[in-house]
Amino acid sequence: MLLAMAAFSIEDMFIKSASQVVPLGFTVLLFGLGGSFIFYCLMKHKAEAVFPPEMRSRTMLVRTFCEIIGRSFFALAIVMMPLSSASAILQATPLVVVLGASLFLKEKIPVTHWIAILIGFIGVIMIVRPGLDDFDFASLFAVVSTLGFAGRDLATRVASPRLSNAQLGFYGFLVLIAAGCCLSLTTDKPFSINFDSGLQIIGAILFGVIAYHSLTVAMRSGSISVVAPFRYSRVIFAMILGIIIFDERPDILTICGILVIVMSGLYLLLNKRRAAN
């Protein structure tokens, strides 16, 4: 999980850097093509079906739609706002997953968990700051991405276990091709890929594949109550990269918001672990 979160942060860094030269839609399109090709090769090496019957289930269709929403809006967020702030808002995804599990999967949630969810959302508001002078409209893209990723995670819970890690990775990157095409409709400016941006896109693809595969292995083979808290390391990696690469300087309200989100999420996860034991 630590490897996945570090790789996701580096992937985001490369996408943000490449998008300063290459339009975001085309960057995401190439990212999806490269990642899906690598996972396709892994599937063929293992003689796995490209489109098994399980892929055509309603659950996988919901997962695909949510993946497109999550990936597209988060890509917009990291390009248009500080990497550290976008990644911090994304840490609210586990809170949304718990909320969604109550609404759609009919899981019972204790009152203390509802309080933790509410406090976590207050942390998001501290970062987004609606109505204040320094409100960043792009932060709403990060908020929408948490809804998409939460829907994807909920669908993954009930997806067929017969789908391999390589197949899930292939579908995860395949939807980015569609997302990239949709984002490409927002610009018609001519562009060219230089050597640096080309390397950045290749780097995003390689680290994206490592991240997606590592995350899938961690969630499927490890104890969720043990590995899930390490998801929050992503905001640490993102903050370090944002400061070093993009000269970002998170203010005190943003840092406090990050702490509130992380502490709320950890409280939920640790309480679930105690309940399971």
Image (cartoon, grey):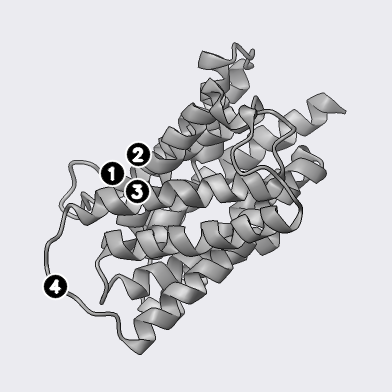
Query: Which residue carries the number 4 mark?
Result: 190
Alpha-carbon span between mark 3 and mark 2: 15 Å
Alpha-carbon span between mark 2 and mark 1: 6 Å
**Mark 1 or 3, nearer chain start:** 1
Badge 4 amino acid: Pro
Looking at the image, residue 192 sits to the left or right of residue 52; the answer is left
Q: Looking at the picture, does residue 3 appear above or below residue 49?
A: below
Eye-nearest disc, 3 or 2 = 3
Looking at the image, residue 133 sits to the left or right of residue 78; the answer is left
Query: Which residue carries the number 1 mark?
Result: 140
At x 36%, y 88%, the residue is: 195
Badge 2 amino acid: Val
Badge 3 amino acid: Ala
Eye-nearest disc, 1 or 4 = 4
**Mark 2 or 4, nearer chain start:** 2
Give SS at disc 4: loop
Circles 3, 2 touching at the beta carbon (< 8 Å) = no
User: Dot 1: within a 10 Å radius of its alpha carbon, few (fewer than 14), some, or many (20 or more) residues?
Assistant: some
Circles 2, 1 touching at the beta carbon (< 8 Å) = yes
Alpha-carbon span between mark 1 and mark 3: 18 Å
At x 88%, y 28%, the residue is: 277
Alpha-carbon span between mark 2 and mark 4: 29 Å
Alpha-carbon span between mark 4 and mark 3: 20 Å
Query: Which residue carries the number 2 mark?
Result: 144
User: Dot 2: within a 10 Å radius of its alpha carbon, few (fewer than 14), some, or many (20 or more) residues?
Assistant: many
Alpha-carbon span between mark 1 and mark 4: 28 Å
**Mark 4 or 3, nearer chain start:** 3
Query: Which residue carries the number 3 mark?
Result: 179
Circles 1, 3 touching at the beta carbon (< 8 Å) = no
Q: Position of residue 110 (x, y in %)?
A: 64, 16
